[in-house]
């Protein structure tokens, strides 16, 4: 069954008289299941369509989407949302709805997305494919389309196939919470400005990244990275999030990133970090770097004396002698600590590990002492160090 939902909104302004303004009528066609769409005779006028089961029914997905439902009669459709309906999509199923501006398929059971499924879209603002149990996408599943955002989060993808986005202009690609460990050559469009691969299974940064010359934001947190690569090809990169990995050292990988304004290295295994002259030179008026919850013992903050930098230092087993010097530099310069970071230095949590040495040295803390330090260094539940600071540059 399909029905029309619509409403009128009235606004009342009180200023010695009443003025009633009728807002533009908005409406959505709602169908209980996919077959209902094919039988309806009024669909030539539809512009917005929601297909989802009755909230009182708990029926698993069981339908295949094809041109039988998405026929020529739906050529005026701008918005399509399909929830908990599909087990498959036929090739070229969207051939007659090329004018879609928003297409969202959510909580279906697709498994495999075939080649030539998403073809020839002219101007899609968002293609949402979240939580559809997608395990495999054939080559050229997306072809010759102009799409602003593609979201494949919360699926079961392990590999991105070559030519997946053949002749596509995608600006943002979001593939978080999957099982990705590999990206084949030419698997992502070179038009990307934003690429998010958080909470996957990468143990290295894909080589494919070097071909994304337009990239402004790259996040790959919560993976299993042990090392990082040279990012010098990404001259437009503004935001880089490598937090929650297993990175133990960094070198000059960030030196040539002239546009970089946000670098997140929280919760890794870093034992040393150096602000190189080239990196400092490229810092703009507002630069944020997050080094919390690593294994750092000292940090030469004199290198960034005259820069306006926001920094996070919490959770590191600082050498107490070194920390005193660092605090003095922060106090007398333009270095900014986030409010959340400052709370960790209010005397309630351990902030450094004392040694018998009288000098500030980057000596390594024995593993037993480090674990003891970290066990006491729990986050305040009212101050989430790793979400409150998150920003988007796009």
Image (cartoon, rainbow, N blue to C red):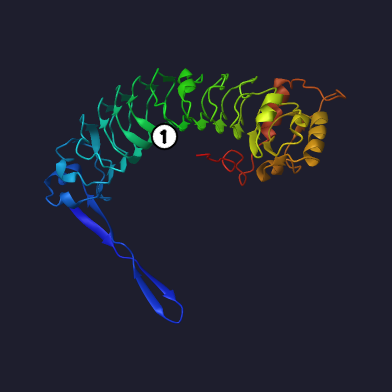
Q: Quadrant of residue 148?
A: top left
Residue 46 lies, with reference to residue 248, above or below; the image says: below
Can residue 271 be seen from the camera position used here?
A: yes
Q: Residue at x 69, y 22 (%)?
A: 271
Secondary structure under tag 1 reads: strand
Is residue 86 toward the left or the right of residue 134 in the image?
Answer: left
* Of residues 172 and 37, the one drawn nearer to the viewer in this rendering: 172
Residue 207 lies, with reference to residue 26, above or below; the image says: above
Q: Position of residue 175 (x, y in %)?
A: 42, 31
Q: Quadrant of residue 69?
A: top left
Can residue 130 be seen from the camera position used here?
A: no
Q: Are there few (<14), some (14-19), or many (20+) residues within 10 Å of tag 1? A: many
Q: Quadrant of residue 67?
A: top left
* Of residues 32 and 10, the one drawn nearer to the viewer in this rendering: 10
Mark 1 — residue?
171
Q: Residue at x 67, y 27 (%)?
A: 279
Is residue 359 toward the left or the right of residue 234 in the image?
Answer: right
Q: Position of residue 97 (x, y in %)?
A: 22, 40
* Of residues 278 and 49, the one drawn nearer to the viewer in this rendering: 278
Q: Residue at x 73, y 29 (%)?
A: 317
Is residue 34 toward the left or the right of residue 290 in the image?
Answer: left
Q: Residue at x 21, y 51 (%)?
A: 46
Residue occupying the far right of the picture: 358
Q: Position of residue 70 (x, y in %)?
A: 18, 40
């Amino acid at each position: 069954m399909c029905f029309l939902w619509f409403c009128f909104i009235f606004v009342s302004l009180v200023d010695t008289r009443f003025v009633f303004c009728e807002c533009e009528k908005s409406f959505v066609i709602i169908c209980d299941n996919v077959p209902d769409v094919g039988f309806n005779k009024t669909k030539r006028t539809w512009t917005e369509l929601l297909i989802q089961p009755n909230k009182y029914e708990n029926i698993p997905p069981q339908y295949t989407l094809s041109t039988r439902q998405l026929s020529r009669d739906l050529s005026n459709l701008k918005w399509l949302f399909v929830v908990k309906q599909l087990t498959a999509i036929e090739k070229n199923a969207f051939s007659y709805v090329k004018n879609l501006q928003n297409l969202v398929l959510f909580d279906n059971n697709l498994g495999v997305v075939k080649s030539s499924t998403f073809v020839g879209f002219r101007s899609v603002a968002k293609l949402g494919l979240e939580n559809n149990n997608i395990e495999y996408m054939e080559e050229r599943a997306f072809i010759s389309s102009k799409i602003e955002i593609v979201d494949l989060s919360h699926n079961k993808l392990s590999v991105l196939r070559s030519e997946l986005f053949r002749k596509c202009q995608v600006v943002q690609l979001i593939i978080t919470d999957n099982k990705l460990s590999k990206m084949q050559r030419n698997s992502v469009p070179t038009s990307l400005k934003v690429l998010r691969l958080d909470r996957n299974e990468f143990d290295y940064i894909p080589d494919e990244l070097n071909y994304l010359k337009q990239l402004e934001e790259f996040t790959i947190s919560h993976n299993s990275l042990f090392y990082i690569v040279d990012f010098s090809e990404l001259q437009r990169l503004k935001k880089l999030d490598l937090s929650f990995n297993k990175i133990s050292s960094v070198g000059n990988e960030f030196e040539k990133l002239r546009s970089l304004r946000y670098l997140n290295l929280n919760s890794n295994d870093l034992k040393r970090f150096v602000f190189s002259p080239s990196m400092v030179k490229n810092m703009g008026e507002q630069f944020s770097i997050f080094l919390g919850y690593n294994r750092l013992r000292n940090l030469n903050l004199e290198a960034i004396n005259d820069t306006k930098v926001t920094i996070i230092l919490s959770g590191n087993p600082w050498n107490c002698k070194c920390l005193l010097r660092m605090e003095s530099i922060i106090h007398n310069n333009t270095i900014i600590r986030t409010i959340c970071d400052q709370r960790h230095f209010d005397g309630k949590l351990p902030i450094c590990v004392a040694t018998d040495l009288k000098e500030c040295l980057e000596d390594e803390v024995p593993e037993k002492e480090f674990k003891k330090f970290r066990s006491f260094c729990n986050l305040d539940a009212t101050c989430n160090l790793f979400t409150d600071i998150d920003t988007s540059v796009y």
